[in-house]
Image (cartoon, grey):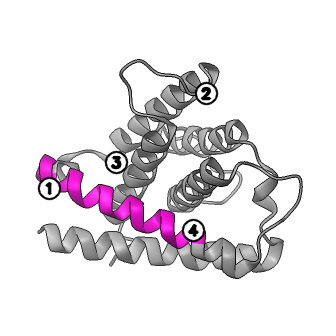
Amino acid sequence: MANDTNKQFERVLELCRELFGKKLYDYGASWRIMRPESLTDQIFIKAKRIRTLETGAENLVGEDINSELIGIVNYGLISLVQLDLGYSDQCDLTADEAMALYDKKAKETLELMKKKNHDYNEAWRGMRTTSYTDLILTKIWRTKQIEELGGETKVSEGVDANYMDMINYAVFGLIKNGLAD
């Protein structure tokens, strides 16, 4: 089953990458101006919207939960890039450079998932998709706290690990919602 998870995870990442590439064409690397705190807030908005939809609120925007989960994956990967590069006052990456950085962070996140999935023995498959939302929101609040502390923690993982966990939970949700089929 782990091999199925790996293939499903890779398939979802391919679909997220495809959308990222289209937006990169439309907007360039405009996200380069975003500070890490703004990216955390963008992921927060998407997770809150998912929770609102999960609780049965009317969907006036028209985008579904999967669209928001894809947004979390892509903003999470952008966040990881920004942690490495820092933010810029301009779009200072070509599309090819941005895609290469996106791919690098996606690969690192996939490798982390493989390790954790092995150690946790596919536990994510027994979880409810609403739990993924709650865990993403928890990781966001942890990230905000670490950002408030200037990145200094005593025993906890850093912001990058929290972003990777958010991405992984979002991908698990997308797999469970049938996006990898």
Q: Amino acid at mark 4?
A: Tyr
Q: Which residue is pictured at 60% across the width and 46% down the height?
A: 46
Q: Is residue 156 above or below residue 97?
A: above
Chain-order first, disc 1 or disc 3: 1
Chain-order first, disc 3 or disc 2: 3
Q: Which mark is residue 147?
A: 2
Corner quadrant of residue 98: bottom right
Segment tinted magenta in the rendering: 101-122
Q: Which mark is residue 102?
A: 4
Image coordinates of residue 177 in percent, x first then y, are 37, 63
Residue 92 highlighted magenta (yes or no): no
Q: Is residue 114 left or right of residue 169?
A: left
Secondary structure that dominates the magenta span = helix
Q: Mark 3: few, some, or many residues within 10 Å (few <14, many ≥20)?
A: some
Report the residue marked by disc 1: 118
Corner quadrant of residue 38: top right
Report the residue marked by disc 3: 129
Q: Is residue 51 left or right of residue 4?
A: right
Image coordinates of residue 181 in percent, x first then y, are 32, 78
